[in-house]
Amino acid sequence: MTIAERIGTLEKKIAQLAVRYQRNPCAIHLLAVSKGQSACSITQAFTAGLSHFGESYVQEALPKIKALENLPLTWHFIGAIQSNKARAIAQHFSWVHSVNSLTIAQKLNAERQDSQLPLNICIQINIDNEASKSGIPAHLAAAFTKSILDLPKLRLRGLMVIPKPQKNDKQQYHTFLQVAYLLEELNSQYHLNLDTLSMGMSDDFAPAIEAGSTFIRIGRAIFGERIQHEH
Ligand SMILES: *Cc1c(COP(=O)(O)O)cnc(C)c1O
């Protein structure tokens, strides 16, 4: 299958899920995860209608962002953030989904240029409390949110999660639902209007959409298996 065909299949599936779960299809955005993919593949995905692209590695992303700067693309950083990369991330991306420490948030805030719009960010939540996973534990999310709201060059949009794989969609749905409830709690506690739930990947986007995802982050189901090595 070509990239355009995979995107067509995926969009049909998303439309069906929106009907099944009574979601507004316009509120479900497709973030094409292009790590390990060439600028040419990204251009094909753009031609097939996509404009949001996600990258996990700064060094790999920067040359692609440069090569494609004439296309109206929106770049999202979704990987682990090393503090020496905070400047490049703050200046070359429009969104960061993986904010998980105050030090990093402060660096991103300091490095975002005054001439740029505030950087859209999501707080990464460690919903399964896995020691090996990065992210803010759910019980610390409220305090963390409060600190983020003080940073003027960051625009907090919502929460991101990479849950551990469960046995079935129903259990995966319940994990995603916890994150959706957490977003509601933050909105009511701080009178906010956070509108973003970044949840769901190629293997679990259906239960993520059922639970209210607004950005599904899809790599393999768009581009096929990644060929280039990950770093
Ligand atoms: C790689 C990656 C994805 C995409 O994963 P696929 O299984 O290829 O859809 C989504 N989110 C994050 C954070 C990733 O690192």
Image (cartoon, grey):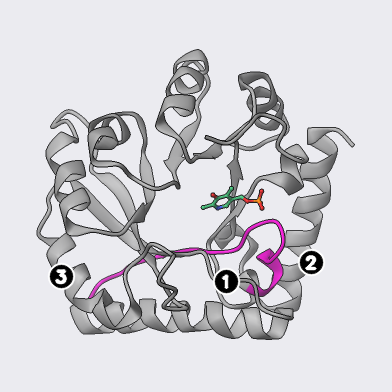
Disc 3 and disc 1 in contact, CB within 8 angstroms:
no
Work out whether residue 70 or residue 62 is closer to the camera in this orientation and state it.
Answer: 62
Q: Quadrant of the N terminus?
A: top right
Label 1 sits on residue: 164
Q: Is residue 23 visible?
A: no
Q: Nearer the viewer, residue 17 or 216?
A: 216
Gap between marks 3 and 2 measured at Cα: 37 Å
Q: Which residue is mark 2?
A: 16
* Nearer mark to the viewer, of 1 and 2: 1
Q: Tell me where residue 108 appears, x and y as whole percent.
A: 21, 42
> Would you say the beta carbon of the disc 3 residue lies within 8 angstroms of ligand 1?
no
Label 3 vs 2, first from the N-terminus: 2
- Up the image or down, 157 lies above or below 231; here it is below
Residue at screen point 70% across, 56% down? 202
Q: Is residue 111 magenta?
A: no
Mark 2 residue crowding within 10 angstroms, few (<14) / some (14–19) / many (20+): some
Q: Report helix, strand or loop for mark 2.
A: helix
- Judge depth for marks 3 and 2 and give the one in front: 3
Query: Is residue 230 among the parts visible in the rendering?
Result: yes
In the depicted view, which residue is nearer to us: 38 or 71? Answer: 38
Residue at 40 percent of width and 65 percent of height:
195
Where 130 sits versus 2, above or below? below
Question: Horizontally, is 62 left or right of 107 in the view?
Answer: right
- Amino acid marked by disc 3: Lys
- Kind of element beneath mark 3: helix
Q: What segment is highlighted magenta in the picture?
A: 191-207
Residue type (three-letter) at the residue carrying disc 2: Gln
Residue located beneath label 3 in the image: 146
Q: Main secondary structure of the magenta part?
A: loop
